[in-house]
Amino acid sequence: MAEGQVNVAHMSDFIAPAGRYAPSPSGDLHFGNLRTAMLAWLFARQSGRNFYMRVEDIDSERSSAESAARQLEDLAAIGLEWDEPVLYQHDRGHAYADALAQLDTYECYCTRRDIREAASAPHAQPGMYPGTCRDLTDEQRALRRSELHAEGRLPAIRLRAHAREWTVRDYYTGEYTGPVDDVILKRGGRVDQAQAGDWAYNLAVVVDDGYQGVDQVVRGDDLLFSAPAQAYLADRLGFTAPFYIHVPLVVGPEGRRLAKRDGAVTLREMMAHVSTADVVGKIAESLGYVGISDAQTLLEKFDPERLPRDAWVFSG
């Protein structure tokens, strides 16, 4: 293990190597979500990996148990089967706390407005935290902490990154080097807001991928930019970063990422007009296969090299 690394791996119910799909239960899955889930399952099963389902329900404001149950029902309906158990992130706070305690971190007192204004300054790097709170003195921190307390706010906790960039491996992109940020690990905000004090996605996803033995991550190519920072965090925690497979998104007729504005886009909405087999057939068509209407047959035919590299336009 390299200097500066820690290891938060523990015995688990999961067996490596593995792939996973990890939806956030804030509503029904739309066609683009279902397509990415199918691809994650295809890549994992074709390569002989276990395939796990993880419910990323750490967002206290938006997540619901009802939504999680509906999502799992929809994924099973399109023919996906997964290895047990299903992991729920709301049960994993102790693991995130263990990881946080072993990382180099600092409190961040910035509001979203503070960050937006700093990001608009000359020479600021788009999408990156400008480091406003990184090097404050103890006296400055005590003052800012007192001010936040008076405002009824909690500080966020950020990683103090010691690398400016990191390289990951991706099936379609090859080696990709991108910036490493002082990412948020624990959220701040007003104490009367449900999300204040929630664990942040960047920490939870890295800890849970390591815990579940996930070494293959399939997700939308809009997330490629975030992979280096997550891989760096995995390295700091003593995990081997996964091999990434970033796949093209599904977009609406206007070329924007698929959303409810594009009409009947969820499985339940589509099933008011067509069968589940028709939906699976449409997923298969989007992957370059015509005349296939069940997941098992698609698995038998699936060739990663045939996957179209452009975004697929959903036409309803």
Image: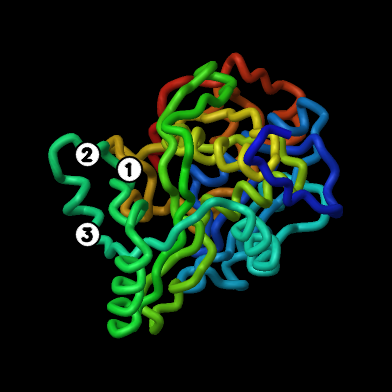
Task: Say which residue label 2 marks.
Answer: 124
Question: How far apart are labels 2 and 1 at the CA level?
Answer: 8 Å
**Amino acid at circle 1:** Met
According to the picture, the residue beneath numbered tag 1 turns out to be 128
Residue 12 located left or right of residue 241: right
Whether pointer 2 and pointer 1 mark residues with C-beta atoms closer than 8 Å, the reply is yes
Are the residues flagged by discs 3 and 1 in contact, CB closer than 8 Å?
A: no
Location of residue 125 (image quadrant):
top left
Please identify the quadrant where the N terminus is shown.
Answer: top right
Foreground residue among 128 and 22: 128
Q: Amino acid at mark 2?
A: Ala
Residue 80 higher or lower than 175, as above or below:
below
Q: Residues within 10 Å of mark 1 (few under 14, many from 20)?
A: some
Q: Residue at x 30, y 71 (%)?
A: 144
Mark 3 vs 1, N-terminal side? 3
Tell me, yes or no, if residue 271 can be seen here: no
Is disc 3 surrounded by few (<14), some (14 to 19) or many (20+) residues within 10 Å? few
Q: Residue at x 50, y 55 (%)?
A: 105
User: x%, y% of residue 285?
Assistant: 54, 28
Q: Please state the total of marks drawn on the protein image.
A: 3
Relative depth, front residue between 113 and 98: 98
Marker disc for residue 114: 3
Horizontal relation, residue 281 to residue 92: left or right: left
Residue 131 lies, with reference to residue 287, above or below; the image says below
Q: Quadrant of residue 170?
A: top right
